[in-house]
Amino acid sequence: MKHNISNLDRIIRAILAALIAYLYLGGFVTGIFGIILVVLGAILLITSVIGFCPLYALFKISTFKS
């Protein structure tokens, strides 16, 4: 897999994932909406760690500058 996410994009994704985790674990977001947010947060965290976003690849977008 080729990287297609820049460092700034990775940081933003990790911060958003942490914010979603805080909202869910703090009890601010519950129910099905909370579960959907947790899944979205997990996806954001995974893509930030590996530096590759499948949606970016599908639409031929890249914020990574080599």
Image: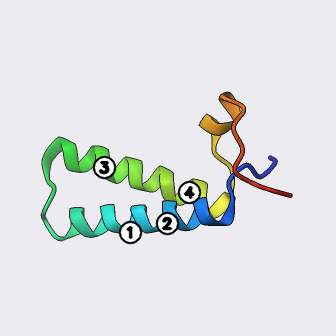
Kind of residue at disc 1: Ala
Q: Amino acid at mark 3?
A: Leu
Sequence-wise first label, 2 or 4? 2
Q: Is residue 38 left or right of residue 28?
A: right
Residue linked to disc 2: 14
Up/down of 33 relative to 19, above or below? above
Number of marks drawn = 4
* Residue at mark 3: 37
Q: Is residue 23 above or below residue 55?
A: below
Badge 3: few (under 14), some or many (20 or more) residues near its Cα, within 10 Å? some
Relative placement, left or right, of 42 versus 31 is right
Q: Residue at x 22, y 50 (%)?
A: 34
Q: Position of residue 39 (x, y in %)?
A: 38, 48
Report the mark closest to the observer, 2 or 4: 2
Q: CA distance from mark 2 to mark 1?
A: 6 Å
Identity of the amino acid at label 2? Ala
Q: Residues within 10 Å of mark 1 (few under 14, many from 20)?
A: some
Farthest residue toward the top?
Answer: 59
Q: Could you tell me residue 41's position as x and y percent?
A: 40, 55
Q: Secondary structure at mark 3?
A: helix
Kindly identify which numbered label has been placed on residue 46: 4
Q: Mark 4: which secondary structure?
A: helix
Q: Earlier in the sequence, mark 4 or mark 1?
A: 1
User: Could you tell which of marks 1 and 3 lies nearer the N-terminus?
Assistant: 1
CA gap, disc 3 to disc 2?
14 Å
When the figure is inspected, residue 28 is found, relative to residue 63, above or below; the finding is: below
| SS assignment at label 1 | helix
What residue is rendered at 69% in x and 59% in y? Answer: 6
Gap between marks 4 and 1 measured at Cα: 12 Å
Disc marking residue 18 = 1
Residue 2 marker: none
Q: Are marks 4 and 1 in contact (CB under 8 Å)?
A: no
